[in-house]
Image (cartoon, rainbow, N blue to C red):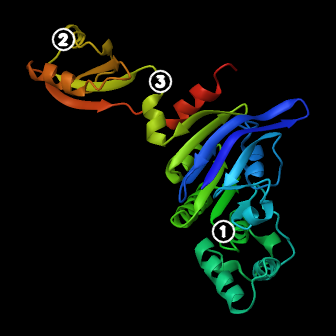
């Protein structure tokens, strides 16, 4: 759907985006993560044709954006971080105005406005001035604006910035519903939003891509070790240490906090090995009672911090 090759953008001597390359498949929801100033917004603005890259290329459905900018823009819907809305207009009048600009007329205009009001959950505010709406409703109106021409690709820059938890959850559900039919690219620094919404996550730091994959894949590939937690009954730590240390991929056996019913143990293991079966078989050969056995999941927050704090 979208192909990006060696995309670079300089602002005078400052390199905001540095030789970025990636592909986006049709129907994919891609989350672009990064700290403030990482290059997310600049990348999105180049994808929309709003900014010209210093070098590199962007193609949409095989068409280079530099040669077919207007045709490609017709495929796109774009919601910037602060939606550019006319505060004095009623919501309905504003969407009707947007439809007119898009040259949507007659029955199709009315049907489109009703469809977007239902999809974005703004029916109850259609006859209120935009300036009197909460930020959550303003974001929904901006989303309806971005989708007025039924674009194939939707680009959202920090769509939940400044919203409260309930509003974030509502916008997230809207994005997931839209994502069933469209290709969506959204930037965010809210990790839970990316994890709950996106099929794929790309982390950008100082203008470079430092990770790209599913959230589960990134969590599995990151970190220097796996952590497994055990709770054992009828066991003493010395025997547990001696027994489980013989497993090749177990690099350390550490006493953890005991529970009311058993001994707490933390095993540090090589990241490339799955040693759960070996651990189970070792315990099975003893008279210990296994009360708890779980592998600690690497959080996306930990992955993000490892990749974006490196060298700072």
Quarter residue 56 falls in: top right
* C-alpha gap between disc 3 and disc 1: 39 Å
Residue 252: x and y, percent?
33, 12
Q: Earlier in the sequence, mark 3 or mark 1?
A: 1
Residue at x-position 89% and y-position 29%? 13
Q: Are marks 2 and 3 in contact (CB under 8 Å)?
A: no
- Does residue 18 sit above or below 187 in this rendering? above
At mark 1, the secondary structure is loop
Q: Are marks 3 and 1 in contact (CB under 8 Å)?
A: no
Residue tagged 3 = 223
* C-alpha gap between disc 1 and disc 2: 61 Å
Residue 144: x and y, percent?
69, 71
Q: Earlier in the sequence, mark 1 or mark 2?
A: 1
Q: Quadrant of the C terminus?
A: top right
Question: Given this view, does label 1 or label 2 mark the residue nearer the observer?
Answer: 1
* C-alpha gap between disc 2 and disc 3: 25 Å
218 displayed left or right of 237:
right
At mark 2, the secondary structure is helix
Question: Given this view, does label 3 or label 1 mark the residue nearer the observer?
Answer: 1
Image mark for residue 59: none
Q: Are marks 1 and 2 in contact (CB under 8 Å)?
A: no
Residue 191: x and y, percent?
57, 43
Q: Using the rendered image of the protein, determine whether residue 135 is visible from the camera's viewpoint.
A: no
Image mark for residue 243: 2
Residue tagged 1 = 151
246 displayed left or right of 309:
left
Q: Using the rendered image of the protein, determine whether residue 209 is visible from the camera's viewpoint.
A: yes
**Of residues 9 and 259, which is closer to you in this image?**
9
169 displayed left or right of 14:
left
Q: Earlier in the sequence, mark 2 or mark 3?
A: 3
**Of residues 9 and 143, which is closer to you in this image?**
9
């Amino acid at each position: 759907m979208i192909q990006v090759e060696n995309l670079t953008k300089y602002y005078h001597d400052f390199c905001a985006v540095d030789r970025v390359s990636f592909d986006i498949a049709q129907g994919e929801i891609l989350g672009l993560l990064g700290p403030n100033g990482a290059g997310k917004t600049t990348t999105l603005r180049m994808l929309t044709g709003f900014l010209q890259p210093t070098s590199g290329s962007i193609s949409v459905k095989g068409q280079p954006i530099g040669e077919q900018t207007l045709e490609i823009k017709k495929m796109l819907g774009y919601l910037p971080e602060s939606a550019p809305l006319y505060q004095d207009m009623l919501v309905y009048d504003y969407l009707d105005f947007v439809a007119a600009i898009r040259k949507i007329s007659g029955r199709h205009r009315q049907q489109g406005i009703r469809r977007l009001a239902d999809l974005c959950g703004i029916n109850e505010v259609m006859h209120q001035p935009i300036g009197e709406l909460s930020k959550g409703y303003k974001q929904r109106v901006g989303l309806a604006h971005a989708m007025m021409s039924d674009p194939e690709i939707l680009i959202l820059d920090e769509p939940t910035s400044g919203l409260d938890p309930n509003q974030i959850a509502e916008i997230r559900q809207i994005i997931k519903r839209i994502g069933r039919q469209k290709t969506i690219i959204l930037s965010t620094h809210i990790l839970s939003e990316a994890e709950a919404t996106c099929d794929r996550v790309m982390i950008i730091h100082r203008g470079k891509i430092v990770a790209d994959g599913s959230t589960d894949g990134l969590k599995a590939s990151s970190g220097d070790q796996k952590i497994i937690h055990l709770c054992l009954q009828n066991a003493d730590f010395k025997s547990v240490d001696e027994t489980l240390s013989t497993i090749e991929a177990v690099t350390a056996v550490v006493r953890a906090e005991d529970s009311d019913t058993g001994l707490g143990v933390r095993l540090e293991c090589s990241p490339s090995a799955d040693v759960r079966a070996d651990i189970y078989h070792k315990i099975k050969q003893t008279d210990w009672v296994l009360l708890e056995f779980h592998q600690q999941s690497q959080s996306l927050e930990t992955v993000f911090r490892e990749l974006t704090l490196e060298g700072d």
